[in-house]
Image: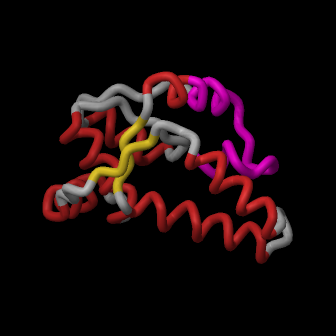
């Protein structure tokens, strides 16, 4: 989702609305999110979709958002959710966090969204 905010060719309808809500309400992310963002930005740069300067701007933009990092990784719960729904462990970490926090989930991933609904979570409209 965050990459869709940061990289122009990843833009999708509704992402701006989710960003506005994030700016107002804040969000919580697993520690993994920070690694995924940086890896995605590096990959985009290596594919000549963005520049190294763009990466700095993107990371600066993210720093200005009210994003809180969760440090209580529910590894076993995430593993169980990954098995139950056929998710990657990484996606299951987001599902586990939303479930544990009783939070809505913002995702563009259909499988993750379906699993979240099955777990009784609300999806942010995107």
At 21% across and 63% down in the image, what residue appears? Answer: 79
* Quarter of the image where one finds residue 99: top left
Residue that appears at 25% across and 57% down: 71
Q: Is residue 117 magenta?
A: no
Seen in the image, is 126 located left or right of residue 122?
right
Q: Quadrant of the C terminus?
A: top right
Residue 101 relative to residue 104: left or right? left
Image position of 17 with respect to 55: above or below:
above
Q: Name the side, left or right, on which 45 lies relative to 23.
A: right
Q: Residue 44 appears at what percent x and percent y? A: 74, 67
Q: Which residues are magenta?
A: 1-20
Q: Residue at x 70, y 30 (%)?
A: 13
State the image coordinates of residue 2 (x, y, percent, origin top left).
59, 47
Q: Quadrant of the N terminus?
A: top right
Nearer-the-camera pick, 68 or 88: 68
Name which quarter of the figure residue 86 lies in. Answer: bottom left
Q: Position of residue 55 (x, y in %)?
A: 72, 62
Q: Residue at x 69, y 53 (%)?
A: 58
> Relative to 88, is 104 above or below?
above
Q: Is residue 104 above or below residue 56?
A: above
Q: Which residue is nearer to you in this view: 65 or 103?
A: 65
Q: Position of residue 51 (x, y in %)?
A: 83, 67
Count of residue discs: 0
């Amino acid at each position: 989702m965050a990459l869709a905010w940061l990289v122009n060719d990843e833009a999708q309808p509704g992402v701006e609305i989710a960003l506005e809500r994030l700016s107002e309400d804040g969000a919580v992310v697993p520690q993994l999110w920070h690694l995924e963002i940086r890896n995605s930005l590096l990959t985009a740069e290596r594919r000549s979709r963005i520049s190294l300067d763009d990466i700095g701007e993107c990371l600066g933009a993210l720093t200005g958002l009210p994003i809180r990092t969760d440090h209580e990784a529910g590894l076993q719960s995430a593993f169980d959710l990954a098995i139950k729904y056929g998710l990657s462990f990484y996606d299951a970490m987001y599902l586990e966090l939303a479930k544990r926090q009783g939070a809505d989930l913002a995702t563009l991933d259909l499988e993750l969204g379906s699993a979240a609904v099955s777990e009784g979570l609300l999806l942010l409209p995107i």
